[in-house]
Image: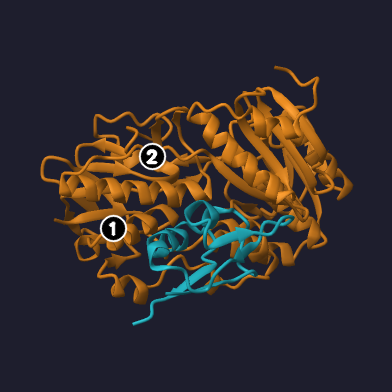
């Protein structure tokens, strides 16, 4: 799985951090998303998918590797 | 099994996509009366013309097809037969269901009957397009209401160079959603951007010229505020009229249990749902994140019902954000009924924190900027709600003389 985020779309709601803090963080000041890893461990894939679903700005996209 | 999801806003789309994640996509039908579009940008970037219509899409036909979800976005439900488990639509179609999800949302409420020239509401993308066209022809806007929507549009229109007058019966903007310590700062912020507040004033009617053009807004005190364009941002009502034949409690939304269940095979999610929060009491929220989170929770509970697994109560703590003149406010938990513990910084300057509750148990937090602290406190609010002592975290933010 390959994760990417859009800083432009991000609205700083922090839902991704709640879903998967191992993969997402937020900027200290404005709260925009900070991606900690582009290729999260398989054990985190379900949590990353939760983050994608929970994001109110559709700022997270994932590419499943075959 | 057919799971029919009514309403294609954020809640309905969340229900359908989460069902698909649980292997139920090809048993799900998503039926809405308009395209699945997001709403928060409508009062902000979209109104300014900085976001395109295509960027508001919550999902697409291609994406839904890939998930096996049957869908239509031009059907309005008009009747429900619980014995036959059948929904009838305005176009004459009838759809039977095994499980039904009500996610049809809310619609604007107007205090006046006149919906003629110059009168606007803001709920749909079409509403936003109309308001945007009207703003292109005027240098002033009158907003009725002191809601989040009213104040956001005031900020947006003023950034577009419009003179903005805001009329509301409340004595302060955002009374119903923000505590005094925060809203006083926000009022100052609005006033520094020349928003003309006419508070404590109730709108009683509209004034029109001989040829029917909007000419002004009349208030209870006998004043007429001249304007050519008025936006009513005076709250919304849940879309439940078509359910009135049922025996359900439809007072302020559809009453459901902690799992989002209205009846054994009927569920509700999003703006329309007044659910029994497991530790905060019954509530109905019109917040964007609630629509998604409750939609996901309801989908999980439908999947659990079908597989015989245990249901999970939907216990998200209320959260919303709002943009006011470039200041992003984030509000988490219960800030209105809890005492102010500490206020640090200035919300008007976009750099502040306010904590509510007691030193051992924090009920709510409001922040502008300071995201790291906001997240720590948000976590502490959640821990407090589950009965944990969080005095260690709160102590870092609260001085010695704060109330116990």
What tint does the image give chain B? orange
Which residue has dot 2 on it? B314
What tint does the image give chain A? cyan
Percent x, y for residue B55?
A: 54, 71
Helix, strand or loop at label 2? It is loop
Image height of B63 relative to B266, above or below: below
Q: Quadrant of the N terminus of chain B?
A: bottom left
Residue name at image x 41 percent, y 42 percent: B272
Which residue has dot 1 on it? B19
| Circle 2 chain | B
Residue name at image x 48 percent, y 46 percent: B290
Choose between B223 and B359: the one closer to the eye. B359
Is B210 left or right of B52, judged from the image as shown?
right
Residue that lies at the very extreme toward the left in this rendered image: B84
Image height of B267 relative to B247, above or below: below
Q: Earlier in the sequence, mark 2 or mark 1?
A: 1
Percent x, y for residue B328?
A: 71, 51
Q: Residues within 10 Å of mark 1 (few under 14, many from 20)?
A: many
Q: Residues within 10 Å of mark 2 (few under 14, many from 20)?
A: many
**Image colouring:** by chain
Choose between B289 and B245: the one closer to the eye. B289
Percent x, y for residue B389?
A: 57, 26
The image quarter containing residue B8 is bottom left
Image height of B43 relative to B72, above or below: above
Is B381 left or right of B217, judged from the image as shown?
left
């Amino acid at each position: 799985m390959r994760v990417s985020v859009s800083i432009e779309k991000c609205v700083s709601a922090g839902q991704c951090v709640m879903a998967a803090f191992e993969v997402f963080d937020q900027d200290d000041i404005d709260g925009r998303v900070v991606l900690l890893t582009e290729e999260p461990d398989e054990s985190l894939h379900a949590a990353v998918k939760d983050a994608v679903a929970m994001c109110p700005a559709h700022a997270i996209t994932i590419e499943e590797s075959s | 099994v057919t799971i029919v999801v009514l309403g294609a806003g954020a809640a309905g789309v969340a229900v359908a996509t989460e069902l698909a994640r649980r292997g139920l996509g090809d048993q799900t039908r998503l039926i809405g009366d308009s395209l699945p579009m997001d709403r928060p940008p409508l009062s902000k970037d979209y109104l300014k013309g900085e976001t395109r219509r295509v960027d508001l899409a919550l999902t697409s036909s291609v994406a839904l097809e890939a998930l096996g979800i049957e869908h239509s976005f031009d059907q309005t439900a008009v009747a429900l037969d619980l014995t036959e488990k059948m929904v009838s639509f305005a176009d004459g179609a009838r759809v039977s269901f095994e499980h039904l999800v009500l996610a049809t949302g809310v619609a604007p409420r107007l205090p006046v009957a006149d919906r003629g020239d110059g009168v606007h509401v803001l709920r749909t993308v079409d509403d936003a397009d109309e308001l945007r066209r009207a703003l292109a022809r005027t240098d002033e806007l009158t907003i009725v209401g002191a809601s989040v929507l009213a104040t956001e549009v005031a900020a947006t229109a003023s950034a577009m160079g419009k003179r903005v007058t805001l009329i509301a019966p409340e004595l302060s903007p955002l009374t119903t959603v923000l505590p005094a310590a925060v809203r006083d700062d926000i009022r100052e912020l609005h006033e520094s951007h020349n928003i003309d507040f006419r508070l404590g004033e109730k709108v009683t009617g509209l004034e029109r010229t001989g040829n029917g053009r909007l000419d002004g807004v009349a208030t209870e005190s006998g004043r007429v505020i001249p304007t050519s364009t008025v936006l009513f941002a005076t709250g919304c009502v849940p879309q439940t009229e078509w359910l009135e034949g049922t025996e359900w409690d439809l007072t302020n939304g559809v009453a459901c249990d902690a799992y989002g269940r209205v009846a054994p095979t009927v569920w509700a999610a999003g703006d329309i749902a007044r659910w029994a929060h497991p530790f905060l009491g019954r509530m109905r929220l019109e917040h964007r994140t609630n629509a998604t989170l409750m939609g996901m929770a309801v989908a999980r509970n439908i999947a659990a019902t079908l597989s015989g697994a245990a249901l999970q109560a939907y216990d998200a703590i209320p959260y919303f954000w709002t943009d006011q003149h470039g200041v992003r406010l984030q509000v988490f938990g219960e800030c209105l009924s809890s005492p102010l513990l500490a206020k640090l910084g200035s919300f008007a300057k976009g750099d502040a924190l306010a904590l509510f509750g007691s030193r051992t148990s924090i009920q709510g937090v409001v922040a502008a900027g300071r995201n790291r602290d906001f997240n720590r406190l948000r976590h502490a609010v959640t821990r407090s709600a589950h009965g944990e002592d969080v005095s260690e975290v709160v102590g870092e933010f609260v001085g010695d003389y704060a109330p116990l």
